[in-house]
Image (cartoon, rainbow, N blue to C red):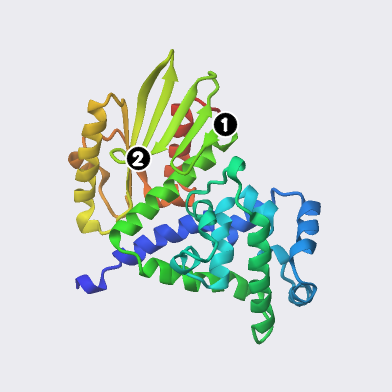
């Protein structure tokens, strides 16, 4: 029965593994491990009410697992989403006009923080800390680390369930772009919400951009000429019966990219349960196939291969 198909849940899993790297506890723990604990301690004292600190201390919960501070959000901007989800507020409500939060939307969705037009993170942390302190005070029985880990999933699940297939596909594309940012972050010289400029090992500028047809393009400046190098198509759907159609859509995009002079063509698609040889028949232009869940989750053989190939294509050491 089609109504019992697991394809939607598989799509949700793709988004979940991506969220673990951007706006759930895994991402927060990774960021905290890279920051100066003295700076964190000072900022916690600036933003977290003393009574809330006592409640968390008695429960064995780190203050940073509940309360945002500027240092964390500067280091990993997508964690705006972690604290939003913990508070239980949907993206639509959080970023609607009049909330004062629209300035932070690109931080959550695209991991972008413009140092020249830095949004007021201090005000954000102060406002969120006030509301999160009330959450800590009102939870009964006493808040636990399990609560902190699981409460964001309730709102995240509703967010996923409210998304249609097109929205899921766009989200997968944005999350793949965040994976790309992770690969090249040490070499970025300019970044906005849709484009990254890096300087590679040969001292040449390389441009990595979100676009349409292809979803992500890699271009390198060489002797005042812009060379089209890699065209990447991202297909986030998971319905096995429709996989060949998705591969066919990738082929159409790659054919357009080929006419523009791109030389390498990659397709990121759900490979689980599929015969890649049959996918190749639908997109013969694709010369590299990567599993979308592994790229989103940043683990597995396909992720390792993608990361290595990407670094090689832009000319940077891993």
Viewer can see residue 223: yes
Which is nearer the eye, 277 or 76?
76
**For residue 114, side relative to residue 289 (left or right):** right
Q: Kindly identify the residue that appears in the image at 65 percent across and 72 percent down.
A: 132
Q: How many marks?
A: 2
Q: Residue at x 57, y 58 (%)?
A: 80
The relative height of residue 8 versus residue 282 in the rendered view (above or below) is below
84 or 61, which lies in front?
84
Q: According to the image, label 2 marks what residue? A: 211
Q: Secondary structure at mark 2?
A: loop
Quadrant placement of the N terminus: bottom left
Q: In the shown orientation, is residue 115 left or right of residue 194?
A: right
Nearest the viewer among 140 and 109 is 109
Quarter the C terminus occupies: top right
Residue 260 to residue 153: above or below: above
246 with respect to 75 (left or right): left
Residue 187 is tagged as 1
Q: How far from the left and from the top, in percent, is residue 92?
A: 43, 66
Res 24 → quadrant = bottom right
């Amino acid at each position: 029965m089609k109504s019992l198909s697991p394809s939607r849940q598989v799509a949700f899993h793709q988004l979940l593994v991506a969220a673990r790297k951007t706006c759930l506890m895994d991402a927060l723990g990774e960021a905290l491990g890279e920051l100066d604990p003295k700076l964190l301690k000072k900022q916690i004292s600036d933003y977290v009410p003393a009574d809330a600190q006592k409640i968390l201390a008695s429960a064995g919960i780190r203050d940073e697992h509940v309360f945002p501070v500027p240092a964390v959000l500067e280091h990993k901007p997508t964690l705006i989403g972690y604290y939003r989800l913990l508070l239980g507020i949907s993206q639509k409500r959080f970023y609607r006009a009049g909330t004062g939060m629209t300035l932070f939307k690109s931080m959550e969705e695209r991991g972008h923080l413009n140092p020249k037009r830095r949004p007021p993170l201090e005000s954000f942390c102060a406002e969120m800390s006030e509301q999160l302190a009330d959450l800590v005070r009102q939870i009964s029985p006493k808040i636990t680390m399990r609560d902190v880990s699981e409460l964001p999933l309730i709102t995240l699940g509703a967010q996923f369930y409210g998304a249609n297939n097109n929205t899921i596909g766009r989200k997968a594309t944005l999350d793949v772009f965040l994976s790309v940012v992770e690969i090249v972050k040490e070499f970025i010289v300019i970044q906005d919400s849709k484009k990254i400029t890096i300087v590679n090992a040969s001292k040449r500028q390389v441009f990595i951009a979100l676009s349409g047809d292809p979803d992500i393009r890699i271009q390198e400046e060489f002797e005042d000429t812009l060379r089209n190098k890699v065209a990447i198509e991202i297909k986030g759907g998971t319905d096995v019966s429709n996989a060949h159609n998705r591969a066919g859509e990738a082929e159409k995009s790659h054919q357009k990219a080929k006419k523009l002079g791109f030389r390498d063509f990659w397709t990121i698609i759900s490979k689980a349960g599929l015969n890649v040889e049959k996918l190749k028949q639908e997109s013969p232009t694709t010369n590299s196939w990567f599993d979308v869940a592994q790229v989103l989750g940043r683990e597995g053989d396909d992720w390792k291969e993608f990361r290595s190939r990407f670094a090689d294509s832009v000319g940077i050491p891993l």
